[in-house]
Amino acid sequence: MREFSRIGIVGCGAFLMGSGIAEVCARAGLDVKAAERGRGAATKRLRVPGAP
């Protein structure tokens, strides 16, 4: 079985699915990168350090 240390998510989804996956992976100690269309969409769904 392969082990992962890094995960990428494209789009966090309208109903928090992608951001939920990102959160679970981050809490498990994985390096998480998420891509959204714009910063506004990302800050609404993800807890971004330094975001209002």
Image: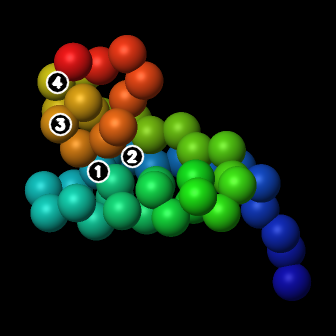
Amino acid at circle 2: Val
Amino acid at circle 1: Cys
Say if 5 sits above or below 39 in the image. Answer: below
Label drawn at residue 12: 1
Say if 38 sits above or below 18 in the image. Answer: above
Q: Secondary structure at mark 4?
A: helix
Amino acid at circle 3: Lys
Q: Position of residue 26 (x, y in %)?
A: 58, 53
Q: How is the image coloured?
A: rainbow
Mark 4 highlights which residue?
Answer: 40
First in sequence: mark 4 vs mark 1: 1
**Residue found at x 43% / y 64%:** 21
Mark 3 highlights which residue?
Answer: 44
Q: Is residue 37 visible?
A: no
Task: Determine which quarter of the picture holds residue 34.
Answer: top left
Label drawn at residue 10: 2
Q: Secondary structure at mark 1?
A: loop
Could you tell me how far apart the alpha carbons at marks 4 and 3 are, in whole angstroms? 6 Å
Say whether marks 4 and 1 touch (CB < 8 Å): no
First in sequence: mark 3 vs mark 2: 2
Label drawn at residue 28: none
